[in-house]
Image (cartoon, rainbow, N blue to C red):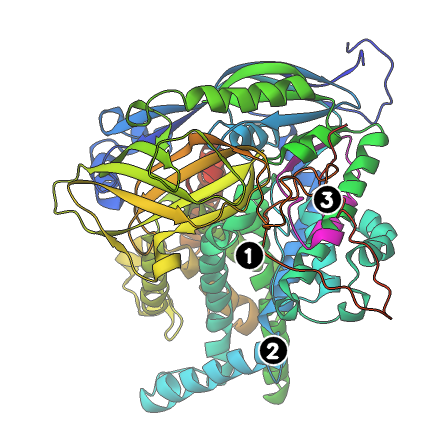
Amino acid sequence: MSDTVTTPAIKEVVLEPGKAQKQYWIDLWRYRELFYFLTWRDILVRYKQTVVGVAWAVVRPLLTMLILTFVFGYLAGMESGDVPYPILVMCAMLPWQFFSTAMSESGQSLVRNAGMVSKVYFPRLIVPASSVITSLVDFMISVVILAGVMAYYRFVPGWEVVYLPALVTLAFGAAFGIGVWVSALMVRYRDFRFIIPFVVQFGLYISPVGFASSVVPDQWRLLYSVNPMVGVIDGFRWAVLGGEHEVYVPGLVMSVVLVLAMIYSGIWFFRKTEKTFADII
Amino acid sequence: MTDTAIKVENLSKQYIIGRHADKGDGLRHVIQNALTGPLRWAGNGFRRDPRTYEEFWALDDISFEVGVGEVIGIIGRNGAGKSTLLKVLSRITEQTKGRITLRGRMASLLEVGTGFHPELTGRENIYLNGAVLGMTRVEIKRKFDEIVEFAEVAKFLDTPVKRYSSGMYVRLAFAVAAHLEPEILVVDEVLAVGDMDFQRKCLGKMDEVSKQGRTVLFVSHNMATIARLCDRSIMLKKGQLLLDGPTDDVISEYLAEGARESAIPLYERADRLGNGKARLTHVEMLDEHGRSVDHLASGHALRLRVHYRWEGDDAPPPAEMYAVVSRDETVQFVMSSSMSTGEPIQLQREGCVDMVLPSIPLASGLFALEICLASPNLNETFDAVGNAMFFEVVDGDFFGSGKVRPNEHWKNPGVLVPHTCESQGAAQTTPVDDTGHRRQAS
């Protein structure tokens, strides 16, 4: 059969149980447009039937910044050194907000797209990944706002700002790594629907968003850096504000290692359970 | 047909079903396991403790081959494994054993409108749905006008689909799917959407697809559709491949099998659904004098007496009983206790329910009866048996016109309803035409 002449476009696919399909990654590439369309859909849908539309992407972080500035900078009287407090807050808040929305969105993404998962084939990894990208778009808008606020205060960042993309990548990796784990787990255990908002809320207080991580005693710094967002947020402050905001290098290295481990194990677990998604979702 | 498009070898799919839904499932159990051996637990993925779970083979050692350009029908009762087979073939879920070889790009259509988002406009959904089904953006763009024209929604392209009528919605969804151009197409019961006109259009499209030399696997309960589209069919039963051959043979075997099964006493039948709290034991067909009969004439009174036993531990509750009368897998009408009286019936430990038809509204033929006993809100099925009984209807004077069979040329006119036709002088009326929906037996 297979020795008959066929057009080269016709490819043979063999499906066998338990075999790691090498075409998985090829499929992932082949379905890159779906990736794009899912991201596009999520962005499009989010601001449908709202009066101000995409302006919400601007209003939301701006309001949060004002509230945090008021509570921590004004009421609690936190020190901000020679840097305007709003910039100090935003430098921490933006990566945190990106991380927390990306993580919870991608964690819930599979269950939210249950219809698609149970009715049509595509590499499932696309779903949590595209949710993270969607959040990244929001983050980019927020970065533009940060630039605006900095311009308002006539604050010029130092050369360290070139490291910003690397730090965004790290936050992206952290959100993706956890999101992949959670999305696969949530297919069976809907308990995570309740766990995630709690983690996000709790995380805001244990991450150095409202304060600087130099508050933490030196002997605890490494342990504190188990939270990958500590490295990211500190790095952000250092990259944008420079000066006295220094990066705790062992902590940052640990963040990178942890994030890589999270992504690797997440994808491994995801791939392992992926084939049963349609049966149990 | 020397080229093989699909080759299935010893395909089996096992499902694990929880014996006790509330026992051992959930996070608490998993955390316990995880604490005792976290690595082993993660390595096992979602596999669970075998002691609390039962195995169920949805597909059991199935092998067949499909040549390039063949259109194959898959026939079987509910639960026979048809949908599972399609899901495994389209890679939505993985088989437990066996091997599938696919040659060519495959697209599956298990549901119409997968990935449609209610907030998005028709235009946006065409792109999204196309991408979900595996089309590229260029491909969708090229087909866009054709899709819109086929769906007849040009005016509403920029309206969110949540404001579409359900007819428009399925038309658009089917239109996108119909313009897929894979080498292998897998279709599950999706043609039964929309109104008559659109259904005919869908069938036409399917005809066209199969004539383009594409390989199609097609699942339907509608024997007429299968007979029209497929030359060869496969019959599944309880996960096993029972028959593989010319469609006409397979369909007649399928219908005959249903009839054979109904020869087994109802209380012994194994092919039942429901939680077993009640058991339908016997169905009798009685004529207007209360005599047990096995066939009746159109227009005569019919009394269906369904005997049951309540086997639950609790007291017999109020319940709903309904009977579905169908012909060649097409529902003709439904009788239901709540529909006719507006109230549930009170079950006894042992008893019977009579469903009474003052005048049988069926033309001659063989009809199947499905009976279901359920809780009044239908949340809980106590017992249900498809093909619980077959009965024959012979021609009778339904309309009281004095003629037993009004017109020789009528074949399967559906359900007979009392009506009159009045002729008036001036206006010319066009004769009623056959809808063309059903294929005439040739």
Residue A63 in picture, x, y percent from top left: 49, 84
Q: Which chain carries label 3?
A: B
Q: Mark 1 lies on which chain?
A: A
Which quadrant of the structure image shows residue B408?
Answer: top right
Q: Which amino acid does label 1 sit on?
A: Val
CA distance for labels 1 and 2: 23 Å
Asked if B424 appears above or below B255 in the picture, the reply is below
Q: Residue at x 65, y 43 (%)?
A: B403
Asked whether, in this view, residue B79 is left or right of residue A224, the answer is right
Q: Is mark 3 on a helix, strand or loop?
A: loop
Crowd band around label 1 with a 10 angstrom C-alpha radius: few (<14), some (14–19), many (20+): many
Q: Which amino acid does label 2 sit on?
A: Gln
Q: Which of marks 1 and 2 is nearer the N terminus?
A: 2
Q: What element carries label 1?
A: helix
Residue A244 in picture, x, y percent from top left: 46, 72
Give the residues drawn in magenta, as a range: B174-197
Residue A172 in picture, x, y percent from top left: 54, 55
Q: Which amino acid does label 3 sit on?
A: His
Crowd band around label 3 with a 10 angstrom C-alpha radius: few (<14), some (14–19), many (20+): few
As drawn, the label of residue A49 is: 2
**Towards the viewer: B258 or B88:** B258
Residue ID for mark 1 = A132
**Towards the viewer: A141 or B143:** B143
Asked if B328 appears above or below A241 in the picture, the reply is above
CA distance for labels 3 and 2: 41 Å
CA distance for labels 3 and 1: 48 Å
Asked if A76 appears above or below A13 in the picture, the reply is below
Residue ID for mark 3 = B437
Whether residue B96 is visible to the viewer of this picture, yes or no, is no
Q: Nearer the viewer, mark 1 or mark 2?
A: 2
Q: Which residue is drawn at 62% across and 66% down?
A: A43
Asked if A203 appears above or below B54 in the picture, the reply is below
